[in-house]
Structure formats: C-alpha cells, structure tokens
Image (cartoon, grey):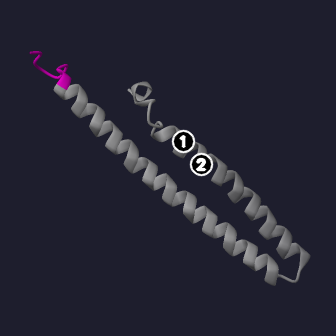
Amino acid sequence: MEQGYNSPFWMTYRQAKELSEAQRDKDEVVRQLRDVEKQIELLLERIIDAEHASVIKAYESKIAKLEREKLLLAEKVDRIVPPKGRLEEFF
C-alpha cells in the first residue's frame, strides 16, 4: 500500500477538495450572474417609464455593458466545474 501524499487516498481527497472549492466558486459566479440579470430587468423597467431620449440611451448603454458582463460570467461558470464525464480533464 502506498503511503504519503501520493497515495490513492490523498489523491482522491485532494480531488474532492478541489472539486468542492470549484463548486463553491461556481455558486458565487452564478449568484453574480443572477444579480446582473436583475439589474438588467430593473433597467428595462426604467426604460419603459423614461421620457427623455438621453435617459433611455444611458439605460441602453448600461444594459449593453451588463449583457457583456453576463456573457463573461456564463462562460466562467462553464469553465469552473467540468460536466460529468470530463472530471479526469479537471485534474
């Protein structure tokens, strides 16, 4: 039986720990993604109520920025924890 930190037990333990940390990171990014989506919804509601073109344009600009941030966060979520079947690629 192997001993030390290269034993199968420790390798599995480290993998489980890294996967747990990755899941925690993913949960945080998903929370950020939801926050961005809520901000976009609020700005869309404000556009409906806005009367001045300059205000509408400012809201549209902010929405465009948030949409780009949303795409980056979605990509980040996909990279954090690999889909099932690709676990070996993660380690």
Check disc 1: other Cα within 10 Å, few if <14, some if 14-19, many if 20+: few
Q: Secondary structure at mark 2?
A: helix
Between 64 and 10, the residue placed more toward the observer is 10
Is 14 above or below relative to 22?
above
In the image, residue 80 lies at what x, y percent? 47, 40
| 18 left or right of 79 in image | left
Q: Which residues are magenta?
A: 1-8
Residue 66: give x, y in percent of width and height.
Answer: 68, 59
User: Left of 65 or right of it: where is 56?
Assistant: right
- Quarter of the image for the N terminus: give it: top left
Q: CA distance from mark 1 to mark 2?
A: 6 Å
Q: What is the three-letter code of the residue carrying label 1?
A: Asp
Q: Please state the horizontal and vertical placement of residue 41, each as a whole percent of the image.
A: 68, 71
Q: Residue at x 74, y 63 (%)?
A: 63
Q: Nearer the viewer, residue 55 or 88?
A: 88
Q: Which mark is residue 11?
A: none
Q: Is residue 17 left or right of residue 63?
A: left
> What is the quadrant of residue 18 in the picture?
top left
Callout 2 environment at 10 Å: few (<14), some (14 to 19), or many (20+)? some
Which residue is denoted by mark 1 in the rendering?
Answer: 78
Identify the residue shown where x is 68% and y is 75%.
42
Question: Residue visible at 80% across and 76% down?
Answer: 47
Residue 74 shows which numbered tag? 2
| Element type where label 1 sits in the image | helix
Q: Quadrant of the C terminus?
A: top left
Q: Residue at x 24, y 30 (%)?
A: 12
User: Looking at the image, do the residues carrying marks 1 and 2 touch, with CB atoms under 8 Å apart?
Assistant: yes
